């Protein structure tokens, strides 16, 4: 149904009352679907069109993508999406191995990213996408089951991909416990034995501010001094399709972090 609603909205004139009405109807439909444990199957076509398609070029589709992301974010934030209960959560962390690697990322967006936004990114781009595919994860069937991570923060189930985020002022905020496997590297073998740390911001063209670099350096020194500096890597060194944590990492600030360990 929502596929037809999107088609109807795209036929309306931008900024018109018809567009406003169609957009309201679409958002109400998404909100209703999100109350179902299998919501991701109900709006599968919308997710594939607006969230998982990487080459969205038209402004209105980009706008709709933001609308869907925000609707999911609000529903997740206020516990309106039925998630897998703790007793039935998948034991994804059962394959956790001794930590010997640390992967550095950047969020690729604005430095002021909030934790709800980051949680929604992990929820949609890591967990929901895998549940939507329906393939077994670690031999566990996820077919027709509500999304779950088995990870908890402040008594709420969370879907962060990373263990830590470093804010522009250098503050390090823990997102996952070290015992949790973060879904951050795009490589399960690496995920099983690594810590994921992300810097808030996009550093493809400019390096992070000094406070942020110092915050990262301090975190590694205080929490992960046991990791061999040669195993402190940028995400792009694990996944060649990525530039994460920014192309400035190698030629500008890598030694500032690793050289101080």
Image (cartoon, rainbow, N blue to C red):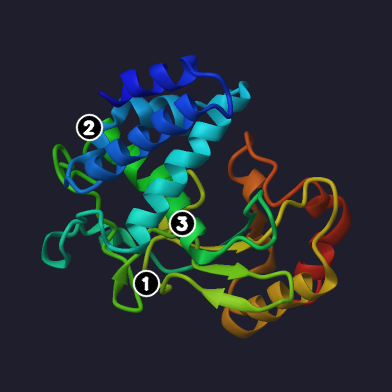
N-terminal of the pair, mark 3 or mark 2, is 2
Residue 125: give x, y in percent of width and height.
Answer: 44, 43
Question: What is the distance, in whole Å, between disc 2 and disc 1 at their CAs?
Answer: 33 Å
Residue 132 drawn above or below residue 99: above
Residue 48: give x, y in percent of width and height.
Answer: 39, 27
Identify which residue is drawn at 21% across, 59% down.
91
Task: Please indicate, yes or no, whether residue 134 appears anywhere in the rendered image.
Answer: no
Q: Quadrant of the C terminus?
A: bottom right
Observer-side mark, 3 or 2, equals 2
- Work out whether residue 90 or residue 24 is closer to the camera in this orientation and state it: 24
Q: Is residue 251 left or right of residue 50?
A: right
Q: Which residue is mark 3?
A: 161
Identify which residue is drawn at 74% across, 48% down.
246
Task: Please indicate, yes or no, whether residue 148 appears anywhere in the rendered image.
Answer: yes
User: What mark, if any, has residue 170 been given in the picture?
Assistant: none
- Work out whether residue 173 or residue 117 is closer to the camera in this orientation and state it: 117
Residue 122 drawn above or below residue 39: below
Residue 147: give x, y in percent of width and height.
Answer: 24, 49
Q: Which residue is mark 1?
A: 179
Q: Quadrant of the N terminus?
A: top left
Residue 3 drawn above or below residue 225: above
Mark 3, secondary structure of its residue: loop
Mark 1, secondary structure of its residue: loop
Q: Is residue 147 left or right of residue 240?
A: left
- Work out whether residue 28 or residue 174 is closer to the camera in this orientation and state it: 28
Q: Which residue is mark 2?
A: 42
N-terminal of the pair, mark 2 or mark 1, is 2
């Amino acid at each position: 149904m929502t596929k037809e609603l999107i088609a109807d909205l795209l036929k309306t004139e931008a900024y018109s009352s018809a567009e406003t009405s169609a957009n309201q109807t679409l958002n109400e439909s998404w909100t209703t679907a999100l109350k179902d444990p299998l919501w991701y199957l109900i709006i599968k076509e919308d997710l594939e069109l607006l969230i998982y398609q990487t080459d969205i070029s038209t402004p209105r589709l980009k706008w709709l993508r933001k609308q869907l992301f925000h609707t999911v974010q609000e529903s997740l934030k206020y516990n309106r999406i039925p998630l897998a209960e703790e007793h039935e959560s998948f034991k994804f962390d059962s394959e956790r191995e001794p930590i010997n690697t640390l992967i550095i990322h950047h969020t690729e967006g604005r430095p002021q990213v909030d934790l709800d936004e980051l949680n929604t990114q992990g929820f949609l781009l890591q967990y929901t996408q895998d549940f939507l595919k329906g393939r077994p994860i670690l031999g566990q069937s996820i077919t027709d089951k509500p999304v779950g991570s088995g990870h908890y923060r402040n008594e709420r189930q969370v879907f962060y991909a990373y263990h830590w985020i470093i804010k522009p002022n250098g503050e390090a905020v823990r997102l996952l416990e070290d015992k949790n496997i973060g879904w951050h590297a795009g490589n399960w073998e690496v995920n099983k034995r690594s810590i994921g740390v992300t810097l808030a911001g996009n550093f493809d063209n400019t390096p992070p501010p000094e406070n942020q670099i110092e915050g990262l350096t301090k975190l590694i020194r205080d929490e992960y001094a046991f990791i061999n500096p040669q195993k402190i890597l940028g995400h792009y060194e694990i996944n060649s399709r990525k530039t994460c944590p920014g192309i400035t990492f190698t030629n500008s600030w890598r030694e500032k972090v690793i050289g101080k360990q």
